Image (cartoon, grey):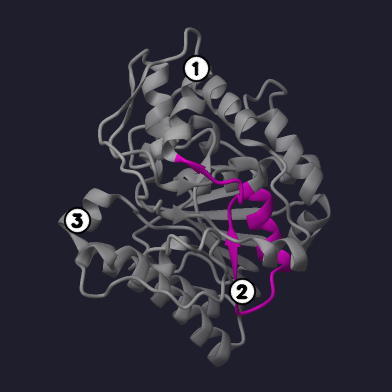
């Protein structure tokens, strides 16, 4: 691998935190769905890096709806020893191999537009897709299964609960079609529990919150991505709401360290929040992004906030991951923003 790889510093960091974990993959096979998304690209990158440097002789089988398009856009991924792409829809794919040791199910389209315009497709993709991947895991006698779920399973977080723990009993409003993503992720988690009980596969759930880093789409529904895009283009940074919601952001290299740790060390049939506890308002996030650009981009907040208005949080408690698995967020937000912006300035594929 070229020493000038643009993510070499991050990949070295990931490997330094996970080297002992990767020994679990020596001469083993892993199956990944969602390998062409934000999470998936980072999982792929870190696997390739570890597989080469530790001489693991491991294989990663990647499910993609159109591998040729992905490899044309990212040719580096298409010509790497140990990475094998399989074409198929997550709901209906043919089982490509008979033996797999580990499975990471990270495939889900989280587009708000798709949630709004075709919630039934979201429903089918998450529910049928999760069951198909679980069935495949049983077919190939996989030992461990990691589901990337979402903090959306908790529904709207109360304003007086700044950090939501895994045992919070809230849930999405099932009378609203817009709740389809969160409610389907809850059902996907339930499927993992059922398969654990019926087939004894070790299933672990990662409830993921908000992230920033290279490969994050800048034209999607992620506020931090949109702010970075505006700054890169030299435009005003637009906050479409009043800027009061509370969020926290984990850098992608920390995210991948956590996901690999959960796959190999998470307790079977348990859920773990994945994210940062360093909360801030969307307004402050916009100004933090703006401060990274020469001359500081102008921040425009489109809606007025009112005194006494409750801020809506979307922030995890990660006490369980910290105490059970000794996981930490080691990359601060300022550094995360700098790294993300620098990467996009030199290599902006989206």
Left or right of 146 in this view: 286: left
Which residue lies under the disc numbered 2? 142
Of the numbered discs 1 and 2, the one sitting upstream in the chain is 2
Q: Closer to the observer: label 3 or label 2?
A: 3
Residue stretch rendered in magenta on the structure? 255-281
SS under mark 3: helix
Residue 254 position (above or below residue 265): above
- Number of numbered discs on residues: 3
The residue positioned farthest toward the left in the image shown: 117
Badge 3: few (under 14), some or many (20 or more) residues near its Cα, within 10 Å? some
Q: Residue at x 37, y 12 (%)?
A: 234
Question: Which mark, by number, is residue 345?
Answer: 1
Left or right of 118 in this view: 74: right
Q: CA distance from mark 3 to mark 2?
A: 35 Å
Left or right of 198 in this view: 116: left
Q: Is residue 215 visible?
A: yes
Task: Identify which residue, 345 or 24, lies in the foreground.
Answer: 345
SS under mark 2: loop
Q: Residue at x 59, y 48 (%)?
A: 43
- Please check the rendered image and state whether residue 265 is part of the magenta-colored stretch, yes or no: yes
Badge 2: few (under 14), some or many (20 or more) residues near its Cα, within 10 Å? many
**Where is residue 147 drawn, in percent x and y?**
52, 66
**Where is residue 86 drawn, in percent x and y?**
45, 54
């Amino acid at each position: 691998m070229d020493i000038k790889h643009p993510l070499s510093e991050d990949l070295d960091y990931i490997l330094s935190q996970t080297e002992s974990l990767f020994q679990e993959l020596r001469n083993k096979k892993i199956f990944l769905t969602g390998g062409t998304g934000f999470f998936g690209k980072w999982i792929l990158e870190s696997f390739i890096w570890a597989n080469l440097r530790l001489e693991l002789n491991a294989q990663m089988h990647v499910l993609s709806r159109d591998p040729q398009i992905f490899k044309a856009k990212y040719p580096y991924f298409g010509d790497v020893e140990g990475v094998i792409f399989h074409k198929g829809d997550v709901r209906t794919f043919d089982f490509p191999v008979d033996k797999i040791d580990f499975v990471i199910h990270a495939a889900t389209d989280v587009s708000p537009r798709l949630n709004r315009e075709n919630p039934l497709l979201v429903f089918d993709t998450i529910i049928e897709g999760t069951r198909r991947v679980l069935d495949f895991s049983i077919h190939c006698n996989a030992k461990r299964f990691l589901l990337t779920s979402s903090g959306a399973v908790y529904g709207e977080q109360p304003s007086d609960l700044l950090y939501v723990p895994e045992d919070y009993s809230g849930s999405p409003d099932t009378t609203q079609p817009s709740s389809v993503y969160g409610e389907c992720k809850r059902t996907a988690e339930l499927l993992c529990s059922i398969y654990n009980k019926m087939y004894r596969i070790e299933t672990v759930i990662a409830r993921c919150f908000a992230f920033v880093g290279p490969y994050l789409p800048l034209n999607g529904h992620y506020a931090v991505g949109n702010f970075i895009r505006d700054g890169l283009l030299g435009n005003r940074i637009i906050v479409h709401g009043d800027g009061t919601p509370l969020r926290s952001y984990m850098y992608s290299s920390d995210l991948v360290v956590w996901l690999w740790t959960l796959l190999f060390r998470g307790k079977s049939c348990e859920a773990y929040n994945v994210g940062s506890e360093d909360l801030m308002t969307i307004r402050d996030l916009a100004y933090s992004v703006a401060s990274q650009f020469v001359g500081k981009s102008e921040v425009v907040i489109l809606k007025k906030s009112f005194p006494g208005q409750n801020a809506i949080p979307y922030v995890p408690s990660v006490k369980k991951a910290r105490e059970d698995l000794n996981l930490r967020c080691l990359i601060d937000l300022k550094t995360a923003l700098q790294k993300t912006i620098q990467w996009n300035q030199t290599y902006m594929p989206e």
